Amino acid sequence: MPSLKFCMFFLVLYRVCFVICLTSAADPIYVRHVCPNTTTFNRNSSHQSNLNFLLSSLVSNATRSNGFSTGFYNVTAGQDPDKVYALFLCRGDVTPTTCQDCVNFATSDILQRCPVQKESIIWYEQCLLRYSDASIFSALDSNDYIFVLSNSNNVTEQVRFDQLVRTTLKEAANEAVNSPKKFSTREANFTTVQTLYCIVQCTPDLSNFDCNSCLQQSFVSLPTARAGGRVLFPSCYSRFELYPFYNDTVTAAPPPTPVLSSPPPKDSYSRNEVIRCIHIGLLCVQEEPADRPTMATGVLMLNSYSVSLLTPQQPAFYIGSRREACNSMPTKELEFDQSKSKSMPLSVDDASITEVYPR
Ligand SMILES: *[C@@H]1O[C@H](CO)[C@@H](O)[C@H](O)[C@H]1NC(C)=O
Ligand SMILES: *[C@@H]1O[C@H](CO)[C@@H](O)[C@H](O)[C@H]1NC(C)=O
Ligand SMILES: *[C@@H]1O[C@H](CO)[C@@H](O)[C@H](O)[C@H]1NC(C)=O
Ligand SMILES: *[C@@H]1O[C@H](CO)[C@@H](O)[C@H](O)[C@H]1NC(C)=O
Ligand SMILES: *[C@@H]1O[C@H](CO)[C@@H](O)[C@H](O)[C@H]1NC(C)=O
Ligand SMILES: *[C@@H]1O[C@H](CO)[C@@H](O)[C@H](O)[C@H]1NC(C)=O
Ligand SMILES: *[C@@H]1O[C@H](CO)[C@@H](O)[C@H](O)[C@H]1NC(C)=O
């Protein structure tokens, strides 16, 4: 049996990487954006100055609340026809600091991507930002834009997995709809070593009824034949994965740091034990989070030779900036996106990325 202390080192490396990638103050991870160029404004117009004012007040108010729970903010500026409506929504579990960083980044990023569009939405892992020349507050929007993203990995036991995902998301939705934040997470055991993680959230300006309709509509398009996926609407989203992708509090309770100073990180190892241990370590630092064993799986692998080990893929660690390393995480998954608009049926061709058209 390899020394648990020695092997924990690799698991801790993995854990640290995970924590950094999900919770660092690095730039938020871009997911998608949409801004139809059918309605545009002139630069230096009053529309432009209203928009600039709104975006800056969203940033300065990002940690406050205006009648809704924190992590959501809506503002308006100007008079018709140049009136602008804007809002942001942070993922329900992120800290106020992460939320503010995300909103701050989003307000400048969106103007790079959508310099003259009157209507724009951008989604990151940590927040979404949206503005329009028409009122978007307290209005259910689950028709105009939809993005369906799916994990590239297929899942075993598809029927049971589909049922578990739907049951778990439904429970999460029931809780979210009736909460002020309109947010909930739920976990469920899929197999002894695989945990299902689910999240749902609506913008909290929606009524309970509209939040529920939005989430139910999102469930219709969920790619449950895959090991993970999400459906993004302007007013709500739902997502499931077989790895933990939310919960800022991970930072608050990192695993104990192993004592590396005590010389054996008396113990004697067989060659096979050491190789097995390094093998597990490499599995833990693979680029694709879904491929990495969970902490529980890692411990199981260490304690049992009956668990056969897969060949590790390229690790996520490389010499480069932390941001690059972290941003590389979701990219692979996003290669398999699908998207559609109300004018287009949902494509079943995973490789295709269809354009989203305006209303
Ligand atoms: C607007 O977007 C469409 C689709 O992306 C593109 O074909 C068209 O050239 C764009 N028009 C302008 C004026 O940028
Ligand atoms: C906008 O205003 C700035 C400063 O007043 C000026 O330099 C710039 O040329 C203007 N741009 C347009 C497109 O009018
Ligand atoms: C938000 O920020 C702006 C600009 O800093 C400030 O003037 C305003 O009072 C804040 N609150 C609201 C509701 O906009
Ligand atoms: C934010 O949205 C709510 C609900 O629609 C609305 O009552 C409120 O006036 C909005 N706030 C601003 C600053 O427009
Ligand atoms: C994240 O997990 C911690 C404990 O593991 C829990 O206290 C917290 O409520 C969770 N947060 C969310 C948003 O689920
Ligand atoms: C997943 O399943 C589909 C359809 O059964 C198949 O075409 C695809 O190659 C599979 N992908 C992987 C990564 O196994
Ligand atoms: C998953 O299984 C473990 C141990 O079997 C149990 O302690 C835990 O409560 C289960 N989690 C859920 C969400 O059912």
Image: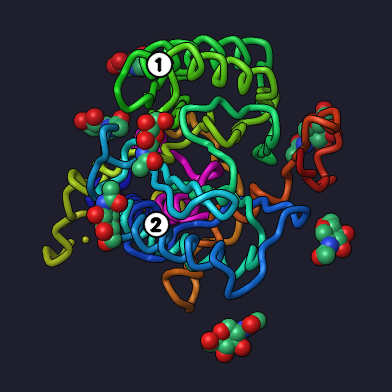
Q: Is residue 280 magenta?
A: yes
Q: Kindly report the distance in space between the C-alpha atoms of the residues bearing marks 2 and 1.
A: 24 Å
Q: Is residue 163 above or below residue 98?
A: above
Q: Is residue 263 magenta?
A: no
**Contact (Cβ within 8 Å) of mark 2 with mark 1:** no
Q: Residue at x 22, y 50 (%)?
A: 5
Which is nearer the eye, 325 or 33? Answer: 33
**Mark 2 packing: few (<14 Cα in 10 Å), some, or many (20+)?**
many
Q: Magenta residues?
A: 277-300
Q: At label 2, which amino acid type do we have?
A: Cys
Residue 26: percent from the left, percent from the top?
38, 65
Q: Residue at x 41, y 63 (%)?
A: 53
The answer to whether any part of residue 340 appears in the image is: yes
Q: How is the image coloured?
A: rainbow
Q: Residue at x 76, y 43 (%)?
A: 358
Q: Is residue 161 above or below residue 334?
A: above
Q: Which residue does the numbered mark 2 point to in the structure image? A: 102
- In the drawing, what numbered circle is on residue 177? 1
* Horizontal side of residue 51 vs 177, given as left or right: right
Specify the quarter for ligand 3: bottom left
Residue 101: percent from the left, percent from the top?
34, 60
Q: Secondary structure at mark 2?
A: helix
Residue 111: percent from the left, percent from the top?
56, 67
Q: Secondary structure at mark 1?
A: helix
* Horizontal side of residue 338 vs 248, given as left or right: right
Question: Which badge, 2 or 1, is on the more N-terminal residue?
Answer: 2
Which is nearer the eye, 42 or 20? Answer: 42
